[in-house]
Amino acid sequence: MRSGGTLVGRTRRRFSFNEKILGLAILLITAVPFILHQHIVRNEVHHHPYHLPPQTSTVVSRNFGSAKSGGGHVRYSINGEYTYDGDLPSDIGDTGRTLLLTALQKRPIWDKELVPNLEKERCNRYFVYQNYTRNTTTYKGRKRRRIFMGSLIADDSWHTLAAIALETYGIYTAVAFVESNRTQTGVPRKSRFVKGTLDHKLLVESNLFGPETEVVVEHFSHEEKVEGLGIIREHMQRDRILKLWKKAGMTPDDVGILTDADETVSRDFLRAVQSCDLPQFDAVTENCDTPKVAVASMVFEGSP
C-alpha cells in the first residue's frame, strides 16, 4: 500500500541464528524428559524376566440392567477361571467398566520376585535431598520394605480407583481408607462405602489391590463444632489412618504413604521405595524431627 508516495506495509521478521538455536533448545528441554521416561519404563517392562504378557479375558455372560443396583451382573473369566461374579455400578460407562473389570482380574504379580540387577538399575534413577545435598539412591541387597497406603475417600470415581489399583496391584501390604459423613467444610453427605453395599464389596472384598493386600474402610463422624483454622477435619481423619496402619500390623521398619484417592505415584517408584537405600529410612541416618519425605516428580493429570 502506498501513502503519500511512501510504501507502507508489514515486513516479515527473520529470526536470527541464535534465536533459532534458542527455540530448538527450549523444544528439546521440554520433550527430552518425557521421551526418557517413556524409554525407561518401556525398557524395564520389556526386559523384566518375570514380565508376563497380558492375559486375554472374556465376559461369559452379560445381562445389564437386571441387577438390583441397576448395573451389570457379570461373570468374568480369564482362561476359563471366573474372577468376578457380581454387579457393576451402572453409571461408570464403558471406560469405567473396562478399567474396573481389568482391575478385578485375578492375575500374577509380574514383578513380585526381586531381581538384584534390575533393582540396581532402578535405584540409580532416583535421588533424595538430605541437608540440601543431593544423593543418588543405591541398592545394597536388602529385602523389600513393606508399604502401607492411606487415603481419605468420598465421591471418587471408579475410573480413578480402578486405575490406581491397576498401577499398584500387589505392592501394598494394606490399604486404609477413611470416609466421613461430612465434607471438609462440615456439609452433611451420605456415606458411600458402607458394608453390604456394592461399592464396599468392590473396594474391600474383591482383592482389587492385590491377592494379599488387606483393604479397610473406617467411617469418621464428628458432629461437634471444629475449633481452629485450616482443614482440621481432614487432619483428624488422617490421624485415623495411622491407627488403621498399626491395626494392620505396621512396624517401625515399614513405610506409609499418605495420598488422595485420585492420586498415585508410579509402580516403579514404589518398588524403588521398597528396595533402594534412602537415608530417611535408615535407622542410623534418619531424622525423627522430619520423618516426612515429600515426593517430587513429573506430574501427569487426566480426567475420565
Image (cartoon, rainbow, N blue to C red):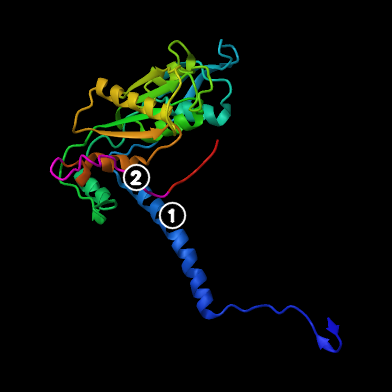
Q: Which of 233 and 98 is in front in this view?
A: 233
Q: Where is residue 95 in the image (x, y as percent from the top left)?
A: 55, 31
Residue 295 is tagged as: 2
Task: Name the spot of residue 157 as percent of width and height, x first.
Answer: 51, 28
Q: Is residue 173 inside the magenta stretch?
A: no
> Would you say 26 lies left or right of 178 here?
right
Q: Which of 130 and 34 is in front in this view?
A: 130
Q: What stretch is highlighted in magenta?
A: 283-298
Looking at the image, how many numbered discs can be counted on the residues? 2
Secondary element type, mark 1: helix
Q: Do the residues labelled 2 and 1 touch (CB within 8 Å)?
A: no
Quarter location, residue 112: top left
Amino acid type, mark 1: Phe
Residue extending furthest bottom? Answer: 5
**Image position of 185 with respect to 29: above or below:** above
Amino acid under disc 2: Val
Magenta stretch: includes residue 292: yes
In space, the residues marked 2 and 1 are separated at their CA atoms by: 18 Å
Q: Residue 152 carries which label?
A: none
Element type at marker 2?
loop
Drawn side of residue 52 relative to residue 67, left or right: left
Q: How crowded is mark 1: few (under 14 residues within 10 Å), some or many (20 or more)?
A: few
Which residue is the site of mark 1?
A: 34
| Residue at x 38%, y 49% (from the top left corner) | 297
Q: In this view, does 42 lie above or below 252?
A: below
Q: Earlier in the sequence, mark 2 or mark 1?
A: 1
Pick the quarter of the image with the N terminus.
bottom right
Residue 38 appears in view: yes
- Residue sticking out furthest to the right: 4
